[in-house]
Image (spheres, rainbow, N blue to C red):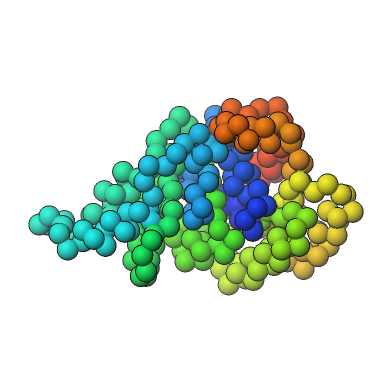
């Protein structure tokens, strides 16, 4: 069974970049194939890995709402979605990307969410790792659209709002029981050591272990500014910090 890592945090904390660095390191170390799930509605993970997703699950839902009454004889709604899922996955060198995206119309996602979980659960044995980038609300985990998570990384910065988001995530996690095996805090781009200590103090009441600090990295900053794929990033402070994270959590 694949080992799974989920990354969460307030928008702007760098969580998507960290998820991309995790995928990059796993590929560089030959721990492939990796299933990459972009569960953030902003869908920025693909571009950081050099991929522009052509289709998303949100788009599949909108198409299905229009086509479900015109399915061929003998094709169930579940069959239709399963075919759509296979078309959505982007198959690349070392990893496959599944982008959730967002739907444009109203309506409940409950049925589709249950199919997503089954689809990911069916796919997982074919991979060594699953890396998931989540919204701060952990919607796809709390709604059980993914299987159990081995390690959750909650990313915080010096922004006080990111601390509040981490506390909110902690409240959500308390309702999820044992579905997440290990819960960690990761600080990102903290410029002041005293602030890092204050951040960890404020979050100490949460049942999360402080795992690592990822420093500001000019090389990483240049990669992102140029739009280069982080798959090729090597020998940088941020990449080295992510390598240590993987080593610590069993990578």
Image spot of residue 197 (x, y percent): 86, 56
The one nearer the camera, 30 or 20, is 20
Image spot of residue 177 (x, y percent): 58, 68
Image spot of residue 89 (x, y percent): 38, 43
* Residue 88 seen from this side: yes
Q: Residue at x 67, y 64 (%)?
A: 165
Residue 150 lies left or right of residue 34; in this view the side is right
Picture quarter with the C terminus: top right
Q: Residue at x 62, y 36 (%)?
A: 224
The one nearer the camera, 219 or 132, is 219
Residue 215 lies left or right of residue 76; in this view the side is right
Q: Residue at x 44, y 53 (%)?
A: 101
Image spot of residue 95 (x, y percent): 47, 36
In the rendered view, tell whether residue 231 sits above or below residue 2: above
The one nearer the camera, 94 or 44, is 44
* Residue 125 seen from this side: no
């Amino acid at each position: 069974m694949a080992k799974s890592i989920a990354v969460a945090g307030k928008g702007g904390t760098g969580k998507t970049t960290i998820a991309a660095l995790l995928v990059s390191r796993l590929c560089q170390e030959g721990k492939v194939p990796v299933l990459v799930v972009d569960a953030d509605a902003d869908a920025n993970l693909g571009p950081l890995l050099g991929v522009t997703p052509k289709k998303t699950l949100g788009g599949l839902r909108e198409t299905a709402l229009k086509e479900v009454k015109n399915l061929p004889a003998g094709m169930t709604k579940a069959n239709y979605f399963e075919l759509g899922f296979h078309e959505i996955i982007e198959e690349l060198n070392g990893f496959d990307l599944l982008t959730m995206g967002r739907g444009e119309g109203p309506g409940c996602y409950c049925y589709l969410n249950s199919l997503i979980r089954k689809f990911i659960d069916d796919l997982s044995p074919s991979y060594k790792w699953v890396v998931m980038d989540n919204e701060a609300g952990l919607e796809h985990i709390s709604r059980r659209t993914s299987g159990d998570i081995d390690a959750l990384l909650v990313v915080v910065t010096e922004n006080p709002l990111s601390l509040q988001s981490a506390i909110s995530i902690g409240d959500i996690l308390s309702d999820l029981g044992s579905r997440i095996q290990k819960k960690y805090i990761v600080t990102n781009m903290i410029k002041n050591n005293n602030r890092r200590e204050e951040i960890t103090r404020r979050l100490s009441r949460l049942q999360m272990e402080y795992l690592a600090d990822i420093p500001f990295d000019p090389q990483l900053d240049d990669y992102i500014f140029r739009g280069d794929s982080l798959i090729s990033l090597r020998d940088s402070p941020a990449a080295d910090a992510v390598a240590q994270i993987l080593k610590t959590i069993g990578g």
